[in-house]
Amino acid sequence: MPAPVADVLTTQTARPRILVTCSLSGPESDPWLIEDLTAYADNIGRELHAQEADFELLDVGAVASWTMDAAASLNEFDGLLVLGGGDIHPSLYGQQPIAAPGYGVDARVDEAEIALVRSAVAARLPVMGICRGMQVINVALGGTLIQDLGPDSIHQVHTDAPGMSDHEVVIQPDTLLASALRAGSATVRSGHHQAVQDLGLGMLATAAAPDGVIEAIEHQDRWILGVQWHPEDPDTLPGQLAALMRAFTDQCRHGEPRAPQPGEQTISA
């Protein structure tokens, strides 16, 4: 049986090293969310190794993580991958909370992951986000979110332990996503009640659901990609996660050399 992602870390310098972040121990996270995120992180880890990439999983919700300095300022990594999780605190994109369902809100985790994204962007590292990770990228670059899509949304049923729904997305041509999936549309596994509203600086909407909700974003001239769905869900169509991780790890392997930028952001606590 494959080892859990948190127990696997190799040091082969010829392989790209990727920092993978999520919160597996946040005090506000429900048990079902932690269980799902752990399984998803394991699937991501196995696929990264299949793509001959090494990684370190950073549990941003752990108490120990608050002594880090931007995860070593990303100095040891060739890319940043931000996974799913709870809702982002609305104050971080200039809004007041509305009376709507929400879960797993932890402003410390939000601030840490936003700072990591900004640090990675400043260092010109490839950045990818999945579900919440896409929202973190958008907020980090100055965008906003729709706080709740409503009870009739096709993306998630409002229950105590929300499940996934399958729906189509239409992908814009000549984009990172279209190149990775080699398709103009895809069936995806979706589970979210929030979504991108105003795009962050330099970001483009590159895929949409039938109801118009933005399902993918990417930067207009940098390798920054976010998908709102869960390609790492075990019931996703075969090959989708591999295609996305292949595109990401190839960029981490062959992308621009890392160059620290003046005023690069770090995390401290």
Image (tube, grey):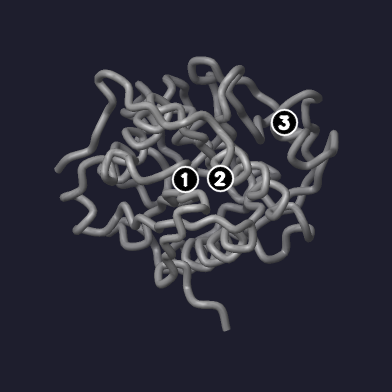
Disc 1 from disc 2: Cα separation: 6 Å
Q: Which label sits on residue 82?
A: 1
Q: Amino acid at mark 3?
A: Ala
Image quadrant holding the C terminus, namely top left
Mark 1 touches mark 2? (CB < 8 Å): yes
Which residue corresponds to mark 2?
Answer: 130
Disc 3 from disc 1: Cα separation: 19 Å
Residue drawn where x is 31% and y is 28% of the image: 91
Q: Is residue 232 left or right of residue 264?
A: right
Camera-side residue of 253 and 5: 253
* Quadrant assignment, res 215: top right
User: In the picture shown, does residue 256 fall above or below 63?
Assistant: above
Q: Is residue 31 left or right of residue 129?
A: left
Which mark is nearer the camera, 3 or 1?
Answer: 1
Mark 3 touches mark 2? (CB < 8 Å): no
* Quadrant assignment, res 95: top left
Which residue corresponds to mark 3?
Answer: 207
Q: Secondary structure at mark 2?
A: strand
Disc 3 from disc 2: Cα separation: 14 Å
x%, y% of residue 7? 40, 72
Camera-side residue of 54 and 198: 54
Residue drawn where x is 77% and y is 46% of the image: 167
Q: Amino acid at mark 1?
A: Val
The answer to which of marks 3 and 2 sits earlier in the sequence is: 2
x%, y% of residue 34? 43, 64
Image quadrant holding the N terminus, namely bottom right
Q: Amino acid at mark 2?
A: Ile
The answer to which of marks 1 and 2 sits earlier in the sequence is: 1
The answer to which of marks 3 and 1 sits earlier in the sequence is: 1
